[in-house]
Image (spheres, rainbow, N blue to C red):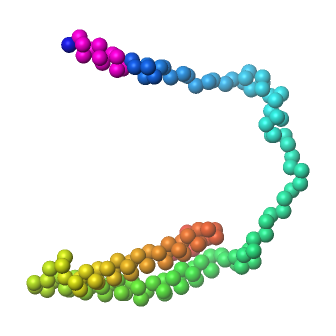
Amino acid sequence: MLSRAVVYLAVCLAPGQAEEKRPAPLYTNADLARVRPYRDQTGVASTPAATAEPARDSGADEKKGRGEAYWRREGERLADRLRPLRSRVTELRRRIDERWGKPGVKSLSDPRIQAWERDLAATEALIRELESRLLDRARREGALPGWLR
């Protein structure tokens, strides 16, 4: 029993584990007054030699006028483009459910169901990709999220 206690103490007091945490430094107003004469060395009082002109974006003229109306139109265009894809998803789901309901059809090995499920997954992935592209583009160009709803 004594040997277990000795081993336990040796493990707990191993080098590096028995070190106490050093307290965080405490700075007072006296410390700040002491280093105040050196604050200009950090560059706090410096002024730029010349003001730089903002870089001209080659597409800046193209991006002008892309306000709420523009992004709402883009959202509507995407919705129009996704409408046939969403109806295809609905139709594929209906076919899969209908095929599963037939007697003697094994859903895991039926080639038609497997083909429809692959087509369904690909169509859903395309929908997500198109939505993601528009959202990313709008975010990069500064559109507010509510403009795409």
From where the camera sits, is residue 22 visible?
Answer: yes
Residue 86 place in picture, x, y as percent? 39, 84
Does residue 142 belong to the magenta stretch? Answer: no
Which portion, as a residue range, is magenta?
Answer: 2-12
On the image, the x and y values in percent for residue 71 come to: 59, 78
Image quadrant where residue 53 sits? bottom right
Q: Residue at x 57, y 81 (%)?
A: 74
The main secondary structure of the magenta stretch is helix
Is residue 59 rendered to the left or right of residue 131?
A: right
Query: Where does residue 72 sit, x and y in percent of width and height?
Result: 57, 79
Q: Quadrant of residue 128?
A: bottom left
The image quadrant that residue 121 belongs to is bottom left
x and y, in percent, of residue 3 in the image:
24, 13
Residue ID at (58%, 72%): 137
Residue positioned 75% across, 77% down in the render: 61
- Front residue of this view, candidates 5 and 142: 5
